[in-house]
């Protein structure tokens, strides 16, 4: 039974919604974020018996190892790691700086890899475990205007599926969650920016509860990948399979997204 969780990016967005659901359901959670002050204010009402707060910079492998050690000292095992922390900076290819390249790949990709590596020794020792990695619909089809984010999430998805295939023999599951746009602060920052218009081209944005529900389903069924909503995922996969056709539709979908950017709930 999954009782001990680690969640990154727990101070806001999907990570916060997931952590709060887990705590409500009686799970023990190590909630991690680089913004420790916000962690403390968000979870002030919870008991230390159920919750461990840790400042974590996912870009630092030694920081990961230290946090994992703290969790093992407190609860002796880790059943599930949820790599939710991420970053998105919308930009055109010609405007992308070296710092922005590093930011996307250090947080989104290296953070996922370092996290996975840090929990593997304990999960292998117990011959069980589940790693949930937050990818994106942008991991299924390239998104002009979000090239760095899209590239980093392609890497997260590929790594997750490869790791899941490799680790299954040890009783460890890995699932890549690939949601469409979600109502979070990350989505709010993209409003009004033409580079991010394609993010808003769907009929609506997902709620954090919908993503948390998908994670709960993944915990039960242990798939290599979950895409939501399924129809948008199918369209994204077809776009990736036939990029020339997809490229011809970019302008139309960008115009649609620009109209919706200021109307997103």
Image (spheres, rainbow, N blue to C red):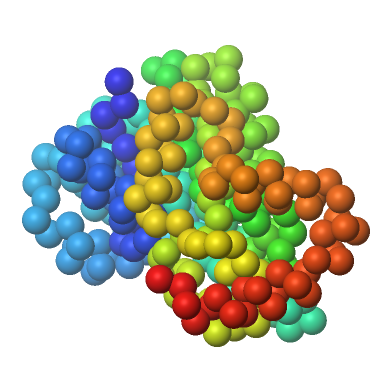
Instruction: Give the residue at the far right of this rendering.
Output: 244
Residue 50's place in the image compared with 263, above or below, is above
The percent position of residue 45, horizontal first and vertical second, equals 9, 56
The percent position of residue 196, horizontal first and vertical second, equals 62, 74
85 horizontally vs 3: left or right: right
Residue 217's place in the image compared with 6, above or below, is above
215 horizontally vs 150: left or right: left
230 horizontally vs 44: left or right: right
Q: Where is the C terminus found, in terms of image quarters? A: bottom left
The percent position of residue 229, horizontal first and vertical second, equals 54, 47
How many tags in the picture?
0
- Residue at x-position 49% and y-position 26%: 222
Nearer the observer, 110 or 13: 13
Does the rendering let one see residue 173? Answer: yes
Does the rendering let one see residue 103? Answer: no
Nearer the observer, 257 or 43: 257
- Residue at x-position 64% and y-position 24%: 166
- Residue at x-position 62% and y-position 73%: 257
- Residue at x-position 65% and y-position 82%: 194
Residue 33, picture quadrant: bottom left
Residue 39, picture quadrant: bottom left
Residue 242's place in the image compared with 205, above or below, is above
Q: Where is the N terminus found, in terms of image quarters? A: top left
Nearer the observer, 117 or 3: 3
């Amino acid at each position: 039974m999954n009782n001990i969780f680690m969640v990154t990016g727990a101070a806001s967005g999907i990570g916060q919604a997931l952590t709060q659901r887990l705590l409500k359901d009686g799970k023990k959670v190590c909630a991690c974020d680089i913004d420790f002050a916000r962690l403390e204010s968000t979870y002030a009402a919870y008991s230390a018996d159920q919750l461990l707060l840790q400042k974590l910079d996912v870009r630092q492998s030694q920081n990961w190892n230290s946090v994992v050690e703290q969790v093992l000292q407190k609860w002796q095992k880790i059943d599930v790691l949820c790599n939710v922390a991420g970053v998105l900076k919308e930009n055109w290819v010609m405007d992308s700086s070296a710092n922005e390249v590093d930011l996307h790949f250090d947080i989104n990709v290296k953070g996922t890899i370092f996290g996975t590596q840090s929990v593997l020794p304990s999960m292998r020792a117990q011959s069980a475990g589940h790693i949930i990695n937050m990818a994106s619909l942008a991991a299924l089809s390239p998104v002009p205007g979000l090239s760095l984010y899209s590239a980093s999430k392609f890497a997260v998805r590929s790594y997750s599926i490869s790791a899941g295939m490799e680790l299954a023999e040890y009783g460890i599951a890995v699932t890549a969650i690939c949601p469409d746009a979600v109502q979070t602060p990350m989505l709010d920052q993209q409003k009004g920016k033409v580079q991010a218009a394609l993010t808003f081209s769907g009929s609506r944005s997902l709620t954090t509860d919908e993503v948390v529900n998908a994670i709960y389903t993944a915990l039960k069924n242990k798939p290599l990948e979950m895409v939501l909503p399924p129809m948008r995922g199918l369209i994204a996969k077809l776009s990736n399979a036939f990029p020339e056709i997809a490229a011809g539709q970019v302008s139309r979908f960008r115009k649609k997204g620009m109209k919706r950017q200021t109307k997103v709930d």
